[in-house]
Image: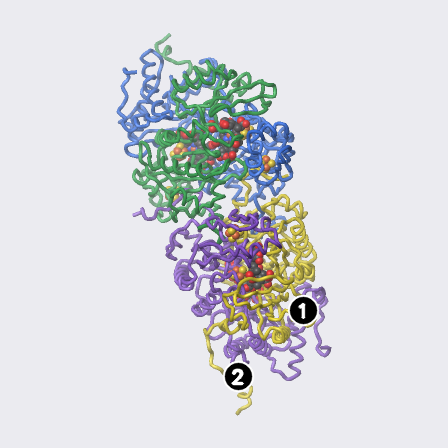
Chain colours: A green, B yellow, C purple, D blue
Amino acid sequence: MVAQEVEKEPEETVEVKTDFGPPHYEIMLHPIIKKNYGKWKYHEVVRPGVIKRVAESGDVLYVVRFGSPRLLSIYTVRDICDIADKYSDGYLRFTSRNNVEFFLTDPDKIEPLIKEVQEKLGFPCGGTWDATKGEYGLTNIVHTQGWVHCHTPATDASGIVKSVMDELYDYFTDHKLPALCRISLACCANMCGAVHASDISMVGVHRKIPRIDDDAVRRTCEIPSTVAACPTGALKPDMKRKTVILDKDKCMYCGNCYTMCPGMPIFNPENDGVAILVGGKISDARYPPQLSKVVVPWLPNNPPRWPEVVQTVKKILETWATHAEKYERIAEWVHRIGWERFFELTGLEFTEKLIDDYKRTPYIYASYRASAAFRW
Amino acid sequence: MVAQEVEKEPEETVEVKTDFGPPHYEIMLHPIIKKNYGKWKYHEVVRPGVIKRVAESGDVLYVVRFGSPRLLSIYTVRDICDIADKYSDGYLRFTSRNNVEFFLTDPDKIEPLIKEVQEKLGFPCGGTWDATKGEYGLTNIVHTQGWVHCHTPATDASGIVKSVMDELYDYFTDHKLPALCRISLACCANMCGAVHASDISMVGVHRKIPRIDDDAVRRTCEIPSTVAACPTGALKPDMKRKTVILDKDKCMYCGNCYTMCPGMPIFNPENDGVAILVGGKISDARYPPQLSKVVVPWLPNNPPRWPEVVQTVKKILETWATHAEKYERIAEWVHRIGWERFFELTGLEFTEKLIDDYKRTPYIYASYRASAAFRW
Amino acid sequence: MADVELPETPLLDELEKGPWPSFIKEIKRAAIEQEKAMKAGKKIKLPGAAKGLLKVLELAYEEKRTHWKHGGIVSVIGYGGGVIGRYCDLEDKVPEVWHFHTMRINMPAGWFYQTKALRAICDAWEKWGSGLTNFHGSTGDIILLGTRTEYLQPMTNALAYLDKLYGSPAPFDIGGSGSDLRTPSACMGPALCEFACYDTLKACYEFTMRYQNELHRPMWPYKFKIKCSGCPNDCVAAKARSDFAIIGTWKDEIQIDQEAVREYAKVIDIEKQVVKKCPTGAISWDGKELKIDNRECIRCMHCINVMPKALKPGKERGATILIGGKAPFVDGAIIGWVAVPFIPADELIEKCCEMLEAIWEWWDEEGKFRERVGELIWRKGMDEFLKVIGQKADVRMVYAPRNNPFIFWRELQE
Amino acid sequence: MADVELPETPLLDELEKGPWPSFIKEIKRAAIEQEKAMKAGKKIKLPGAAKGLLKVLELAYEEKRTHWKHGGIVSVIGYGGGVIGRYCDLEDKVPEVWHFHTMRINMPAGWFYQTKALRAICDAWEKWGSGLTNFHGSTGDIILLGTRTEYLQPMTNALAYLDKLYGSPAPFDIGGSGSDLRTPSACMGPALCEFACYDTLKACYEFTMRYQNELHRPMWPYKFKIKCSGCPNDCVAAKARSDFAIIGTWKDEIQIDQEAVREYAKVIDIEKQVVKKCPTGAISWDGKELKIDNRECIRCMHCINVMPKALKPGKERGATILIGGKAPFVDGAIIGWVAVPFIPADELIEKCCEMLEAIWEWWDEEGKFRERVGELIWRKGMDEFLKVIGQKADVRMVYAPRNNPFIFWRELQE
Ligand code: SRM
Ligand code: SRM
Ligand code: SRM
Ligand code: SRM
Ligand code: SF4
Ligand code: SF4
Ligand code: SF4
Ligand code: SF4
Ligand code: SF4
Ligand code: SF4
Ligand code: SF4
Ligand code: SF4
């Protein structure tokens, strides 16, 4: 044995194996879940964060939900596992909005579990809603990478989310809202997440044209695909100089060119910021799915806690919560009261920036009010 | 005086006078109208075709409405004038849908007037509606020139209108409909009229590409504007041959190029025909204005009486009339029952041709159903 | 009438049957009576035109196609529009209608007439034209259907001196066609209707008179239409059929006569016909009193329409301006959208004129050939348009705000 | 923890305050614990990565900008996707995270785990990576945040032999990235939810397994996402976030347990909460019996959501396929629209596979670079798309028919 051979890790010597796919989900199911798979009868919300699920077999399972920061160190994941081993027979799941769920068969363990999670992990129990009563909790914010990992963000993700959730914490742990309200955040217009169809969303936006570094463009970019990436036709190839030319009157700072080409960075500390959208919806319940609509075109990036963004989101949420009927999501509420009233009640300003002029989007015209009917 | 001078008509010797404008409307107002201008208090529908208007002054005027074919010989116009002189103090008006109205102060003259008009002119009394009762008559069909005068029609106008109105005559003379229903016809996609926003409309459509007569194009057409007229980019200039080239896969036979250029006639006797649209609406009453939607992509040109078109329009009208609630115009009715039911009840076929794919139109996407919610 | 011979038109004859008044009968009548009049010694410059039309039309019905050709440029002295040139492709067969140009005559606002005026038009057209008309064309003009190039000017003069030559109470002028201001039109408004929120006839007349030059001399990228409706019922279809729609409305509270409501309650079901049909649920009715929450009311007119004796638009009246309405070419059919939510009635005409002039200047500068103003706005953005008309953005201009964050920040670019 | 020194991060420290769990605490914890573990003799290949991240992030917070650069091409043997390359522009200052690539690991359908599996992943990532993760990424993958190029392959191998090397109940494979099939995801469906109209987990798993090649080797014009929701509530936001959304639904009648309805009536206001909220007015309730007019029901789920004990989707179950959902680039954000109104549950997986394969072939052929399938359909027309998937047009595919008569009659052109 030579020294070098000793150094090789097992992972460096195994044969490469591909395309075997993810673990089969069945392996991962708690025995009660496996047994009652497809045979659940109904559920009841016991308290915020705790859903009692009753199977046709009579089996009962308590699903207990906790908020998570999504960005987890493996040490916290191990803590979560410890808790799952202790309370949940070694099984757990994450929800589609990044919450953690444990499965309990003994209702007496619910309170100890909640206490232990809060103490060990600091994760709050909640994020659920009770449709029967029409009482809703706020759940976790779906979000993206931001300054933690991505190269194209116009703002951070986790920092704003943390700041907003700190402020809205009680809505998570309690059922104080009249209807479902989904908040999302994306750090750039790529909108990794459902920002384009959420009740309230935040999206990082630029407000200045990209800076073209001709050298870098020449070195690192495929010019035709960069030009093609521009939705407004603001870019033209400059064949001679092997770079691109930007028509600044056409550019709306979407950053799609930068996604394609590192040679034209668009970030700009003072002018980047956050736009707020509202009224998106995905479920078919009562009212058809809707795209989110921009109600604040820009708020400053003000780290570490983005107070302007936090307060605007809170203001919208609470205005809605005060005025909406049971089950009335923001889209439905606005449909009833009119956008006139939305702006009046929230105190937000309607400006020409909120009138659609994105020609690629096929909805532009449908957004113009072809009617003399409106409220004052 | 030489012979030639004697021949000159006065119209040939007067000095040309321009830009003096139409007669002032005041000259044309019946004295009672002039007196009570802007001071009408209310109206009541006395019977189909007769509206009683009461002024704040206490004055009462009976407005009696008659259907007209719109295309009038001056001899008929003179007859109309005779009647107006006899009953209406020498005043009359036409409505925005080409009906004729007389003004009576004496209610006892209503019946004699109706009788005389029917006898002398054959114009039926009707075309009104009674919003208070929620009982509606059908009014005249707004239409265009067709084969009588225009160069671009895909069908005739007056002939179809006559055929349809013959069939729907009783709806004109009576108040048998649940709500307002406006029918329009345009003989080509230029849609001279409100075909794009009527409860039921008929529009002449082509189904074959234009025939390019290169010689004629060279002789008579401005090539750049012809090319620019094509909404789908199907036309390209052929610089060398001084004509245009047509990409038949892109052409949707709109005829806009022919409007610009006589050198590319598009009419085609066997393939031209009539599309039927429904659900347009203009008033703001209850429900916002709507564009009409195509429900039959094509029916044959079958002169002189277009039975397929007539029967389809009648079927739609009567299906709606049977099922709609009071005040519910076609758009509102369909909104309530769903397009699924509309096609089921009318027996019309929904095909891929009815799914929007006109890219220039900014509504295309808004028409796609972004929801799993529908009826069976 | 037996002494006048008509061409054989078996297909057209089918359209004389049935109860609805027949346009074929009208054409035949013109053919017969004009010939008779001529025989009786009247001056008829275009004999046989209506007969010719019958022949052409019968052939069209046989062959299922039009026989009319592009018109080329025909016009009258001093004007660029108002005449639609039209030629027949059957020159040899039916020379009577080889030329068959249409004249568009500017009607009086609201389509009100004295018989004297109509008779005068008939007399002039009997002499100089086919004797066929449309009352009215769908833009609103009186349409004189079919004459020869050489009679256009005399007929125009006949109309210009219709008072002197034919005893009309006033002369008539030519309407619009081509890339100009088209003949504005208006609902009957205050003349007959209790709902009118501004004087539609006056507005229509004022625009027409002030913009005679724009109306008569095509010089824009494309046509431009103005229509005036006195209330949101929109009885001239302005929203859909005009680039610039003036829709009467009000800002304050609907006027209610409770006594009259109670009268209506005796004959109609107020709950069902009014309360339930209010789109915003702004109305309540307890059997005695009708209450309207005017903050919720969107001025749709429904309740007023049903109970005209009891309800009236408020007192603070004016109009909403909708911009861009048009037929489907090229960017698709458009129902106009809100450009100005409210202009008080007493400022209306002046404000509209200011706006119109600003719009035309901009459109003239920026518009492409055959680009309607709505399409231009769409291409350029409401942002720019609002600057042109000097308006601030208002949420009432949209059904909903934009759904994308692709916003121009022009003011930040150096 | 006092023995581990962290960089000064006054701005980030602010984000440790407040009740919501802090991601900054997580990063700090990784920094501290990994260093401690290393000191305790554990094999740690990438010491200081979390600490490096803190430095970079603090700077980002100071300067209000990212310090991450484009990634270039980094990948593992046999695969084209699954790794997001990432470099830091502060190479000199913070060499620890100069490389900071992300690995996307295909999660089990429905995000269900045994702790054994999770622990194994943690152990491997403690060794080969930053010790930082996302549970989960917003497509659904397990995200392993940050490692160096040379550790990508060993970490991939660690996962591939996670059972053998780390005691996991099963190995884990890489997820999608780039222009490939992205990791499909599914709501918990039949595992926990009584509303599931088809087996979402099975469908998700089947697609994933059948299309391993498409998932691992980017070769399309752009990305393609599949998401499975068991009912129209759509708890994985499939309609908005996937090109191919499978939404469970039913065709027959809602199942009603009247006794249970009466139980609910004791605690909730059925008239107000259910009857009034039904979008089509399909429900009535007389205090004893709940009646649903299933011809009017559009299967929106509302009534079932409110009374899960009493109401259930019908027995004829299956799914609606919506196509084209995506984020705003380039043609605007799209919520997917109906491509197939109903596929019975027992045919679902096979039918979907047939369709998927046909769609991919067509898109591969016709799609432009970076053109999502929804955009392609829009460019080409639903007509052509329906032929591709072998479906007939159905009115349920649209909110309304087209508003223009500009219809292609391709079959008539020679
Ligand atoms: C005479 C005319 C105006 C004119 O200046 O010529 C007119 C006259 C009246 N309209 Fe109108 N409308 C006239 C064309 C229109 C149009 C335009 C069109 O049809 O092209 C519309 C818009 C149609 C649309 O929305 O697509 C129109 C939409 C209405 C409405 C809205 C009804 C609704 O439920 O949507 C009302 C209100 C009502 O009566 O219900 C209305 C109400 C009225 C009233 C009751 C107003 C009044 O107080 O006098 C008038 C008589 C009612 C009747 O005939 O029974 N008028 N009305 C037009 C008659 C045309 C005809 O000969 O039939
Ligand atoms: C006579 C009339 C139809 C009728 O029988 O009533 C008419 C007739 C013609 N229209 Fe029109 N339009 C007439 C009202 C309309 C309307 C309705 C309106 O004004 O309320 C519209 C729809 C509203 C609009 O403006 O969008 C209309 C939209 C068009 C268009 C399409 C414009 C567009 O932007 O899409 C064209 C095409 C063009 O301009 O080249 C057109 C073009 C034409 C031409 C000039 C044909 C052509 O391509 O050159 C037609 C001449 C027919 C003839 O031989 O007399 N006509 N046209 C109407 C004018 C009479 C009048 O002055 O009172
Ligand atoms: C990691 C993740 C965000 C997160 O924090 O969770 C992510 C991160 C990135 N996304 Fe995304 N997307 C992620 C889910 C999404 C989603 C949501 C979803 O899948 O449900 C969307 C919206 C839905 C969709 O596909 O339209 C999304 C829409 C985009 C787009 C815009 C695509 C479009 O057609 O408009 C881009 C741009 C691109 O592809 O170049 C993009 C590009 C990117 C890139 C690769 C940046 C780039 O321009 O190359 C980001 C890498 C960040 C990094 O450094 O790690 N990402 N991206 C998500 C993937 C994790 C996972 O695999 O589980
Ligand atoms: C756990 C989760 C599914 C998963 O596989 O992970 C889930 C679970 C349930 N959802 Fe959901 N939904 C979950 C994400 C979603 C999403 C997706 C999202 O948020 O991104 C939606 C679509 C959101 C939208 O429309 O924008 C969603 C829209 C609904 C609705 C529709 C409510 C509405 O009024 O629009 C219901 C029905 C209800 O309960 O009212 C629903 C109902 C439910 C029920 C009651 C279903 C059941 O019978 O168990 C579940 C628990 C309710 C609770 O938490 O109180 N679930 N649900 C997801 C929880 C995320 C979280 O941690 O908070
Ligand atoms: S939203 Fe933009 S910046 Fe944020 S992770 Fe996605 S691609 Fe990166
Ligand atoms: S930022 Fe967007 S609009 Fe501007 S040049 Fe780049 S791709 Fe085009
Ligand atoms: S609709 Fe077309 S064919 Fe008919 S009159 Fe107008 S332009 Fe001519
Ligand atoms: S008919 Fe229409 S689509 Fe066809 S070439 Fe002419 S303008 Fe273009
Ligand atoms: S638009 Fe209004 S004001 Fe004008 S006639 Fe119609 S109802 Fe009367
Ligand atoms: S005008 Fe229309 S919105 Fe206003 S109260 Fe009457 S019905 Fe309701
Ligand atoms: S989508 Fe439907 S089936 Fe799936 S978890 Fe949500 S409610 Fe249950
Ligand atoms: S599922 Fe929705 S549409 Fe159907 S009955 Fe229930 S609430 Fe009404």
Badge 2 residue CB within 8 Å of ligand 2: no
Contact, CB < 8 Å: mark 1 with mark 2? Answer: no
Q: Please tell me whether residue C174 is drawn above or below residue A31 in the rendered image.
A: below
> Relative to B306, is A147 on the left or the right?
left
Residue matched to label 1: B111
Residue located at (33% from left, 27% from top) = D15
Looking at the picture, how far across and down is residue A8, in whole percent? 38, 13
On-image quarter of the C terminus of chain B = top right
Q: Within 10 Å of the Cα at label 2, are there few (<14), some (14-19), or many (20+) other Cα atoms?
A: few
Q: Which residue is mark 2?
A: B10
SS at circle 2: helix
Which chain letter matches label 2?
B
Task: Work out whether D30 lies above or below C43.
Answer: above
- What's the mark number on residue D237? none
Q: In the rendered image, which quarter is residue D193 located in?
A: top right
Out of C12 and B200, give the one closest to the viewer.
Answer: B200
Q: Amino acid at mark 1?
A: Glu
Return the x and y of residue D83 as percentages of the image width and height. Answer: 42, 27
Q: Amino acid at mark 2?
A: Pro
Q: Secondary structure at mark 1?
A: helix
Subunit ID for the residue under disc 1: B
| For residue B181, above or below residue C86 | above
Q: Locate residue B251 relative to residue A316 in the image: left or right.
A: right
Q: Earlier in the sequence, mark 1 or mark 2?
A: 2
A220 left or right of B92 in image: left
What is the C-alpha distance between the residues marked 1 and 2? 43 Å
